[in-house]
Image: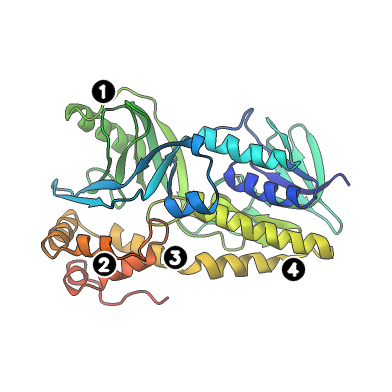
Amino acid sequence: MKWDVAVVGAGPTGSRVAYHLAGLGFGVAVLERRPDIGGKAACTGIIGRECAEAFAIDETTILRQADSATLFSPSGNRIKLHREEPQAYILDRAAFNRAMAQRARSQGAEYYLNTPVESIKSADDKVTIETARGNFAARAAVIAAGFGSGLTDGLGKFADFTAGAQAEVESKSSEVEVYFGREVAPGFFAWLVPTSPGKARVGLLSRENPTLYLKRLLASLAADGKIASAEVGINHGAVPLKPLPRTYGDRLLVVGDAAGHVKPTTGGGIYYGLLGADIAARTLHKALQSNDLSARSLARYEREWQQLLGRELRTGYWARKLFEKLSDRQIDNIFDIVKRNGIDEALLKEKDLSFDWHSKAILKLLGHQVVASAVNVFRLPRN
């Protein structure tokens, strides 16, 4: 058998698994349905400083740094968040994906593009990946094909997800802006993220009609002179808000968006996906060495990622459901309370609050009695 591991999906998470395992001497094939390795349609491509440093993100894939953002309430009230050092980086997603794939290739992983996977079947001694271009056999498979591929159906259904829409626009804006309100993105939020000079990404999340809401937002931004035109192409995507019920099986692991390793608060999945990829690679390394690729053996993957990410995902989802229930008036009240009591400045001074780990910020914010009262919170989530 030529392949030890077949990875389905050539995004950063799949390439990270391939990089590790190929570097350890295993034969790795990466199967990608697209004819080339490129970007993700509705992804803003924002990562935190911790992610950039932990994974040595290639600087040539970073379009710009961000050290501040302005938040807009439904009535137009503003909160500006700023720190002296960069807090986030905006990536060129296509270049980032290619760079991660190149790392894996440098270790010996082989990529098969334009190879959509139709099914994955596990047997006693191998897993067979059926594609439109023929079958691949391997000792184990990793599903890194993103959310909604259908390849994870045997592991359960996602309990919750939402839709997103995004457009590339011409803009002279120099700062990240985030918009809240039921007329903008009901239950979620919208964004304007400058990328390269004269360019920006405008997008939002919404459970229904994201395209309609995005068109309205684009028209509003164009009327305000923040973007050059509302007549732009729109990309679409979907984001899981809770993890897959089970992320492992016989000779099989699921990583990244396909596993639901996505922040429920923002929909960002790059950092958590890469962290899960490292755990998956360690788990497979041990299993391949011992030649025990049973579900029982691979279950350690889920235990490890739950230990690392579980609390964040649970708290983030709780906060997400709470936020969806808020009226525009309640959101405006929160903005007023935060500004009037200097809570925004106090949180910014907290050194242990992170762009990537949101549970502490959520609990600290709702720990303020005036904020908790404004959103009718009587019981905080258990850790």
Disc on res. 214:
none
The answer to whether mark 3 and mark 1 are in CB contact below 8 A is: no
Provide residue 222's location: percent of width, then percent of height. Answer: 22, 27
Label 2 vs label 1: CA separation? 36 Å
Disc on res. 297:
4
Q: Which three-letter amino acid code belongs to the residue tagged 2?
A: Leu
- Label 2, on which residue? 365
Residue at position x 21%, y 66% in the image: 375
Q: Residues within 10 Å of mark 2 (few under 14, many from 20)?
A: some
Residue closer to the observer: 137 or 304 = 304
Q: In this rendering, is residue 357 above or below 173?
A: below
First in residue order: circle 2 vs circle 4: 4
Residue closer to the observer: 379 or 288 = 288
Disc on res. 228:
1
Label 2 vs label 3: CA separation? 15 Å
SS assignment at label 3:
helix
Disc on res. 312:
3
Q: Which three-letter amino acid code belongs to the residue tagged 3?
A: Glu
Residue at position x 27%, y 31% in the image: 218
Q: Is residue 161 visible?
A: no
